[in-house]
Image (cartoon, rainbow, N blue to C red):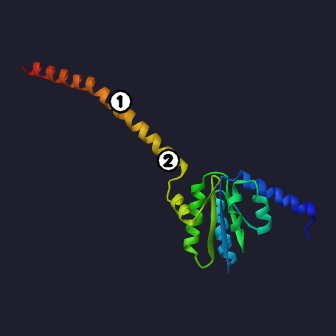
Amino acid sequence: MKSREQKQKDLDALAEQFQAASAGMLIGFNKLTVAKDQELRRSLREAGAKYTVVKNTLARKAAAGTPFEGASEHFKGVTALALAEGDPVQLSKTISKFVKDNPEVFKFKAGVVEGRVVALGDVEAIATLPSKEELIAKVLFLINANAQRLVTVISAVPRNLAIVVKQIGEQKGEA
């Protein structure tokens, strides 16, 4: 049995994780096998997320005063929690893929992204978005493409002039 001090430490640690997380997903499950659990944990670890099974009472108390406060009513039944401090898109992709692949085992309860409670449809919409790195690469490509076009247009005039001078020189050499 945990002491009151240990329970308070657990509560404070979970509240701190809720504050630090930019996104979190609440998942319910039943008939979970060890292999499926390990597979989910591995995929979430690769996505940069933390995964834990939480006690609902503890989670509701820890959520008070955090961005997860709006999701408190979803802490019912068996609840697992996946938290990400970085890119919420990667977490959303991982969770939505796993829930779709294993509907008999996992059930999506709710999600919290940037302080807003989101439903499964919103999580799937977020999952279809490109990651932050992909978006930055696309913007940089677009900026670079315009610069390349400008350089091509500016360098076309002297290049064309050199071609004309060369052709005139060749014509005079033949005559």
Residue at the outermost bottom position: 31
Alpha carbon distance from label 2 to label 1: 25 Å
Give the labeled residue for mark 2.
135
| Secondary structure of residue under mark 2 | helix
Depth check, front residue: 55 or 39: 55
Q: Residues within 10 Å of mark 2 (few under 14, many from 20)?
A: few
Q: Residues within 10 Å of mark 1 (few under 14, many from 20)?
A: few
On-image quarter of the C terminus: top left
Which of the 4 image quadrants contains residue 58?
bottom right
Depth check, front residue: 164 or 59: 59
Given contact means CB atoms under 8 Å apart, are the residues at marks 2 and 1 in contact? no
Which of the 4 image quadrants contains residue 162?
top left
The label shown at residue 151 is 1
Residue at the outermost left position: 175
Residue 124: image location, x then y, percent: 53, 63
Depth check, front residue: 63 or 86: 63
The label nearer to you, 2 versus 1, is 2
**Vertically, is 133 above or below 84?**
above
Residue 19: image location, x then y, percent: 73, 52
